Amino acid sequence: MTFPSALHLRFVVAVAVVLLCTCLVVPVYAGLQRLHHPPKKDGILNFLVIGDWGRKGEYNQSLVATKMGKIGEKLDIDFVVSTGDNFYDDGLVNVTDPAFVESFTNIYTANSLQKPWYSVLGNHDYRGDALAQLSPLLRKIDNRWFCLRSFTLHAGIVDIFFLDTTPFVENYFIELDHSYDWRGVSPRPAYTSSLLKDLEEALVNSSATWKFVVGHHAIRSIGHHGDTLELIKLVTPMLKRNGVDMYINGHDHCLEHISSKDSPIQYLTSGAGSKAWRGDVKENNDDFVRFFYDGQASSYFCGSYKKRIWHHKFDKCLVMITPFLEVMNLVTHLVLEVDLCLGLDHLLHSPQLRDVEFLFVLHRSVPS
């Protein structure tokens, strides 16, 4: 595997969010509210991704938050993405539930994390008052918080599509151990059908260089919960036919990267924001498992976009490293000097990268 030798634009994906005052609501797509985040003048975008976190600082949530703050400062992040299960064990009781402050405001206190947090709901969030997390009243308590069931964030070279995945999972509607707040969702078939239609329309109309989809549940995972069959059936075909580059989720309390065998889609799990499940790993998956880490962490991504003039071999080149890599000079080197012609296996086994939990290269070939 080789890399292009020059870069016109670079972007970094890490855990963070843009100040709400810079986000303009643009009602473009039929059913998905669209937000706009103006890119920096240098074209670099930085954000962090975290999932399954809200435990009032316990189970290493506070330690992860501290690391997030340090990396957020180094990367000058734009915003944070939350993949859901924001408040354990049963969501919020109402909009005045002190758990919102105890698990969010009082935990992510670093200056670098005082940016918008774009969030989706997880299954644990639906066990409480789901409408409370969606309420704009929470932004009066902490103006970083922004949570909708499904929406689109346009951030320059990338469109991020946030998808409410919990209503797709049939088991939640028949299990007896827990109750769920289905207000605004029932009847389920009509809700999911409409949501799929809205998502497809948004994907079709997107002209962004990169298309990322964020949901709580995994499409591909070797963690505790594993693959979500309903999403494989209903969502995956749509992602493939609309050129989606990456699907990002939580739900399994781990970090992992799986590559699709029959498309360019990369499946990333970032669900290790607090309590992790050590050693809970499934052995098999139909796609390529690139990386698995079963400890607590958050994820950030470093990438670059390049259209080569003299040799159209690569249309896109993306380098991703996570979590919390301290040797930032090495990251810069990999991003700016990508003509090193180092393959994935060599990179993963390099002594210089012994502290890197996760690194991969994504490329797309185009006709020469």
Image (cartoon, rainbow, N blue to C red):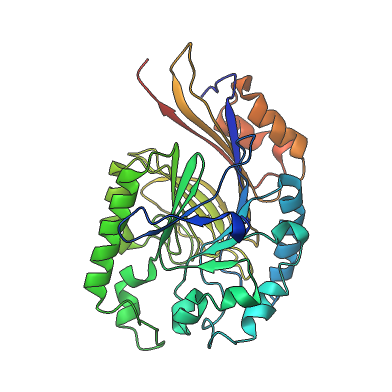
Q: As rendered, which of 111 and 274 lies closer to the eye? A: 111
Relative to 166, residue 200 above or below: above
Q: Residue at x 35, y 39 (%)?
A: 263
Image spot of residue 161 (x, y percent): 42, 54
The residue closer to the viewer here, 64 or 110, is 110
Q: For the point 44% across and 74% down, which residue is it?
A: 123
- In this rendering, the answer to whether 285 lies above or below 141 is above
Instruction: Tell me where residue 285 appears, x and y as whole percent.
Output: 39, 52
Q: Quadrant of the C terminus?
A: top left
Q: Position of residue 343 (x, y in %)?
A: 56, 28
The foreground one among 349 and 59 is: 59
Q: Is residue 34 above or below residue 97?
A: above
Classify residue 195 by image quadrant. bottom left
Q: Position of residue 290 (x, y in %)?
A: 51, 44
Q: Quadrant of residue 354?
A: top right
Residue 298 visible in the snapshot: yes
Give the side of residue 228 with respect to residue 52, left or right: left
Instruction: Inspect this view and state whether residue 325 appears.
Output: no
Left or right: 167 with respect to 111? left
